[in-house]
Structures are given as C-alpha cells and as structure tokens.
Image: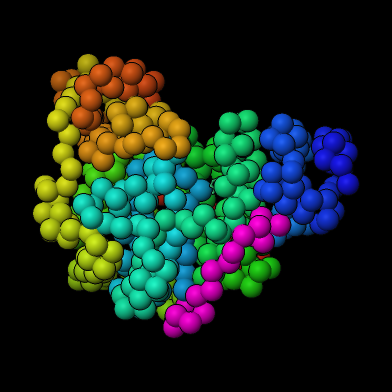
C-alpha cells in the first residue's frame, strides 16, 4: 500500500477500506508517514467527507493506537462527559459533583485549553495544590470513595488522536464532522467508562456553526458510542455567547462554586442541571424528569458542593479557596469597559471573547505556554441586557498590563449593540439518543 495512492483515492471521493484506514493511522502514529502526506489526506477527508463505515474504522484505528483504561473493578455505572469546546464552559466542575452526589460515578479525563477554548484541567489547577496528574491507584481510590475524580488525559490513551489533532490544528482541518467524531470518540472509548454524555456546542464559539451540522455530528458520535456498546446521549447546547459570566481559570472556579452554592448565572445553572440530569439518566438513576429533580436538589442541599470539596481535598487542593473564593489567585491589573451610549447588548461573540481572554494570559496560543491563573474577563452584561451609558459591561483581569491593548481590540469586535432587544435561543437546542432526535429550538 502507498500513502500517495490513498491520498489520491480520497481526493477523488473514494471510500477507504478498514485496512487502508489502519495503514494511514498506524503509519502516521509510528512516524512512517510524513506530516505533509498526512496533511494532504486530512484535507482530502475535509473536502470529500467519510461514510459511517469509514468514520467507525477511523475511530477504531485511533482507539487501538494506544492503551485502553479498564474501570470494570470500580462498582457502579461510570459515566463520562465531553464537550466539543466552548468559552466559559465550567460545566464539569458543576455537573460532575452533582452526579457523584446522587450516586453516579464520574471517572473523568479532561483536557487543557488551546486557542480560544478553555480546559477543565487548567481551571482545576487554579486551585492551589490541586493535582491533575495523580497515580492511577489514587485516581481509582478517589472514584471508589467519593464517586468522582477528574484528571488530565493520559498520553497513553489514543496517541494517534494527539498527533493527528496537532496537525489538523495547524492545517485548517479541525471543523470536519468525521474527523471531530473519530477524535472525540476514540478518546472517550479508550477512557473505559460505561456511558458517555456528549455536549455538542453550536454557535459563534463552537466548531459547529449551525444546529443542523451539530445534530449531524451528534448523531455520528452517538452511533459510534452505541455500536461500541456504550450508552451514549448528545445534547446540542448554545455557544453563541460565553456560558455564564466568567471566562478564565480562577474566575471560572469562583463562578462554579457560586452555582454549587445555589447562586450564579441562570444560563450556566440551567445548562449544568440538564447535563447532570442526562448523566444520571445514563447511570440508570431514573427517568429524565426524576434525574432533573435530583440534580436541582443536589444544588439546593449543598451535596454537590461537598463533592467538589471532597475531590479537591483528595487531589491535594486547598479547600479554603472554595470556602472563601476571595483567596483564589488575584490579578494585579483590572480594567473596566464602560458603555458609550444607552443600548441593548445584542451579541457577544464567544470565540472573540475566548481569544481576548487568551490574550490576557488565561489561555495558550501554543502548546506549552504558561497561564496566568488570575487572568480573564467578567461579563457584567450578557446578550439581551440593557446597558446604560457609562455602566460597566465587562471587567478585564491580567497580571501583565501590556496585554490589555490587544485584548481590548479583540473585544471591540466581539460586542454588538442595538436599540432593540434581541431574540435569544435557549441553552439546550436539541437532544440526540439512539434512534431518537428531539429538537427544542
Ligand atoms: N475536540 C476534540 O477532542 N477533537 C476534535 O476534533 C474537536 C474537538
């Protein structure tokens, strides 16, 4: 088999066999196929797409490129949750403790942020002492004892995805349904849980720009998960504006704690309840409506908050910063943006807010960049809010004043004003289960 022939085959719209896909994935992972040929093949896939059999083969080849975790010795239904990427997305910090507080088991490997999207691992590391790289025995002990542990993605799981994703990221081939579906599902299947909840974001801050594309991606991933014998559900969630009001690391932990204490922004609270309810449903805890009630109660009675405290303590974190979030890392430079006239905030481009937050130091432009845990943006106003002339609508935080100019330029392009109240979409737009698609908006 020659890589050249396979590039040309895909370029002309041919369907690849199982053997051909294995040849490509294994060859590239082992370093036998050079990046220029792999990039050409990925671009051919971007233009020509893949049928469902090819997408399954690609997922399988990536899944078997490394080790797979075996969690079968941990009692209970283990559930994972994965978001296709967002801005201000601190839902794992809220939904996972809710699920654990009601008897679900969350053994989760999460990622770091890259580009405009944030990562759960970075957020957790803004809690002083919190260890996201713990020994496997400690991870299992924490899951057994508290029903929850969140650690960094092991490099041994689906190593092909890591290499392929890095190449896609610099060659414009990320936003492609079969490539996203195989990338996510190979990692999720390798992580060894029994059930998977997928949060497929749609809108200005997401890879999927339309609901139709998002539903197609969701259906592809649910199909892969169910074929592999894992109960899989996908929710299509709105990422036209950042989720909640905080974007950054420590600032997002603070907001997550607010929600866990029964307060916090309504859009974030609602999204987390739906995510947690679906995770509990996948764990077999009851009908969706019953699971929703359980999730709401867990926020009201403080049991979800206690689970975050338990996990933090078990993973070496300083729980005093959760009891008093004023102790979390603080920025030395604070700048407020004020409205120039009376108007409705009509749109807040999530991708641009994410880029601005990265420019302030909260995210990485490239792998290996060091983060400023205190950097970020607080959105006092969200789309649909009326803002008076002179009123603060955003506060910027950083430890490096030189970063402000470029961040503010980006934010200028993120905000739209109007004299009419905009019509907004709800938090959850659709739900996809095996053989079932529900559209809500
Ligand atoms: N997240 C992933 O893990 N992979 C993709 O391809 C896109 C989002």
Please tell me in which quadrant of the rendered image residue 351 appears.
top left
Task: Give above or below for 204 relative to 161.
Answer: above
Task: Give above or below for 195 relative to 368.
Answer: below
Q: How many numbered discs, if any?
A: 0
- Residue at 31% across / 78% down in the picture? 145
Image check: 260 left or right of 70? Answer: left
Say which of 325 and 69 sits in front.
69
Q: Position of residue 338 (x, y in %)?
A: 19, 22
Say which of 344 and 192 sits in front.
192
- Residue at 36% across / 32% down in the picture? 358
Task: Give above or below for 295 relative to 77.
Answer: above
Say which of 267 and 41 sits in front.
41
Judge whether residue 73 is colored magenta. Answer: yes
Q: Position of residue 188 (x, y in %)?
A: 55, 61
Image check: 222 left or right of 6? Answer: left
- Residue at 28% across / 22% down in the picture? 403
Image check: 153 left or right of 439? Answer: left
Q: Position of residue 198 (x, y in %)?
A: 51, 58
- Residue at 52% across / 54% down in the picture? 155
Q: How is the image coloured?
A: rainbow
Residue 74 shows up from this direction: yes
Query: Start and end of the magenta stretch?
Result: 61-77
Image check: 20 left or right of 303? Answer: right
Residue 218 shows up from this direction: no
Main structural element of the magenta stretch: helix, strand or loop? loop
Q: Position of residue 431 (x, y in %)?
A: 53, 58
Judge whether residue 48 is colored magenta. Answer: no
């Amino acid at each position: 088999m020659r890589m050249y022939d396979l590039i040309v085959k895909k370029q002309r719209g041919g369907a690849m066999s199982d053997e051909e896909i294995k040849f490509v994935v294994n060859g590239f992972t082992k370093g036998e196929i050079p990046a220029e040929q792999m990039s050409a093949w990925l671009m051919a896939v971007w233009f020509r797409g893949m049928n469902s059999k090819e997408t399954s083969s690609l997922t399988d080849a990536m899944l078997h490129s490394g080790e797979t975790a075996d969690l079968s010795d941990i009692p209970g239904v283990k559930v994972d949750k994965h978001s296709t990427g967002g801005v201000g997305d601190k839902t794992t910090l809220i939904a996972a403790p809710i699920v654990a507080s009601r008897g679900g088991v969350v053994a989760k490997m999460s990622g770091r942020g890259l580009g405009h999207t944030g990562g759960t691992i970075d957020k957790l590391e803004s809690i002083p002492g919190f260890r996201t790289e713990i020994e496997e025995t400690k991870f299992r002990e924490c899951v057994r004892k508290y029903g929850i542990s969140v650690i960094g993605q092991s490099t041994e799981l689906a190593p092909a995805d890591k290499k392929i994703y890095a190449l896609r990221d610099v060659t414009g081939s990320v936003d492609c349904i079969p490539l996203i579906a195989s990338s996510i599902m190979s990692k999720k299947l390798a992580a060894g849980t029994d059930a998977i909840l997928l949060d497929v974001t749609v809108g200005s801050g997401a890879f999927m720009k339309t609901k139709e594309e998002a539903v197609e991606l969701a259906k592809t991933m649910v199909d892969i998960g169910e074929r592999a014998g894992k109960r899989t559900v996908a929710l299509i969630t709105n990422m036209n504006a950042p989720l909640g009001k905080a974007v950054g690391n420590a600032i997002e932990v603070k907001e997550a704690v607010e929600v866990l204490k029964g307060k916090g922004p309504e859009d974030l609270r609602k999204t987390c309840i739906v995510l947690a309810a679906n995770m509990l449903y996948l764990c077999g805890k009851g009908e969706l409506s019953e699971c929703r009630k359980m999730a709401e109660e867990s926020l009201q009675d403080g049991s979800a908050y206690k689970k975050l405290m338990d996990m933090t303590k078990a993973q070496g974190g300083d729980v005093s910063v959760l009891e008093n979030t004023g102790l979390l890392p603080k920025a030395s430079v604070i700048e407020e943006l004020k409205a120039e006239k009376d108007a409705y905030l009509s749109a807040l481009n999530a991708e641009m807010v994410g880029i601005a937050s990265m420019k302030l130091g909260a995210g990485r432009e490239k792998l290996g960049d060091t983060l400023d845990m205190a950097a970020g943006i607080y959105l006092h106003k969200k789309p649909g809010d009326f803002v008076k002339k002179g009123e603060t609508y955003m506060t910027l935080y950083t430890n490096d004043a030189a970063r402000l100019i470029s961040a503010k330029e980006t934010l200028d392009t993120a905000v739209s004003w109007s004299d009419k109240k905009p019509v907004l979409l709800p938090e959850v737009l659709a739900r996809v289960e095996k053989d079932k698609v529900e559209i809500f908006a």
